[in-house]
Amino acid sequence: HLDALGVKLTKLTDEQAEYLGVDPSGPFKSDHYRY
C-alpha cells in the first residue's frame, strides 16, 4: 500500500531515537504511553 502512495519507510537514526526517547529497534512509544 505504501508503494502506491510513493512512501518509503526508513529506520530511525540514533539521533532521532535519542530525541524521541525511544530505542531505535523498538518499541517506539515512550514509557508514559504504556498502560
Image (cartoon, helix red, strand yellow):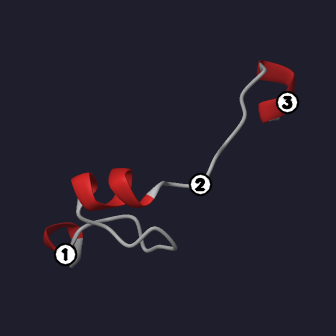
The crowd level at tag 3 (other Cα within 10 Å; few <14, some 14-19, many 20+) is: few
For disc 2, the marked residue is 11
Q: Quadrant of residue 4?
A: top right
Q: Nearer the viewer, mark 2 or mark 3?
A: 2
Q: Is residue 23 above or below residue 3?
A: below
Q: Is residue 24 above or below residue 11?
A: below
Residues at marks 1 and 2, CA–CA distance in whole angstroms: 20 Å
Image quadrant in which you'd find residue 8 = top right
The N terminus sits in image quarter: top right
Up the image or down, 34 lies above or below 10; here it is below
Q: What kind of element bears circle 1?
A: helix
Left or right of residue 22, residue 14 in this image: right
**Which label is found at residue 18?**
none
Residue at the outermost left position: 32
Q: Nearer the viewer, residue 35 or 16?
A: 16
Q: Nearer the viewer, residue 7 or 16?
A: 16
Query: What amino acid type should be assigned to the residue bearing mark 2?
Result: Lys
Circle 1: residue type = Asp
For label 1, the residue is 31
- Residue at 41%, 61% (x, y): give it: 14
